[in-house]
Amino acid sequence: MPKKTFSRNQNRITEHPILEFERKKRIRFFFQGRPLYGYEGETIAAALVANGIRVFRHTEKLNRPRGFFCAVGKCSSCLMQVDGQPNTMVCIEPLRPGVRVEPQQGRGKLP
């Protein structure tokens, strides 16, 4: 039987074939203004998935939902607005205490 390379413990990613998700100190961040919790050392995308958030943005032309896909910064599925900055790849952006994350509609517009 092949070794399992991707698993979730209560929605938290614990194993991945390429990335490491090290759990350190529990920290609070905000998604659409509501407080959520994640761990230092994980990405914003991993923390969102652990909190049950699956849709990160919608495409511009066809309004299709996009979420956690490649997890290595090669696609654009995870683009979100982070602390007011659009087009942030949350699959590689480290989670920080107090960070504010918003979904993105289409192409992000700079403030």
Image (cartoon, helix red, strand yellow):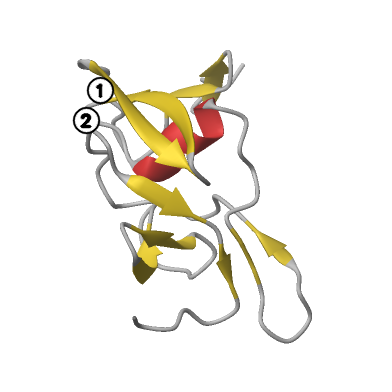
Query: Does 11 sit above or below residue 87?
Result: above
In this picture, residue 72 sits left or right of residue 6: left
Which label was assigned to residue 84?
A: none
What SS does tag 1 mark? loop
Instruction: Name the residue beneath numbered marker 2.
Output: 41
Labels 1 and 2: the sequence-earlier one: 1
Question: Which quadrant holds residue 57?
Answer: bottom right
Q: Which residue lies most toward the front here?
A: 33
Q: Residues within 10 Å of mark 1 (few under 14, many from 20)?
A: some
Three-letter code for the amino acid on which mark 2 is drawn: Gly
Question: Which quadrant holds residue 52?
Answer: top right
Quarter holding the C terminus? bottom left
Residue ID at (35%, 83%): 110
Query: Does 47 sit above or below residue 1?
Result: below
Marks 1 & 2, CB-CB < 8 Å contact: yes
Quarter holding the N terminus? top right
In this picture, residue 105 sits left or right of residue 89: right
* Residue 24 picture location, percent across and down: 21, 17
Label count reads 2
Instruction: Name the residue beneath numbered marker 1.
Output: 22
Residue ID at (49%, 37%): 48
Q: Residues within 10 Å of mark 2 (few under 14, many from 20)?
A: some
Q: Nearer the viewer, residue 74 or 68?
A: 68
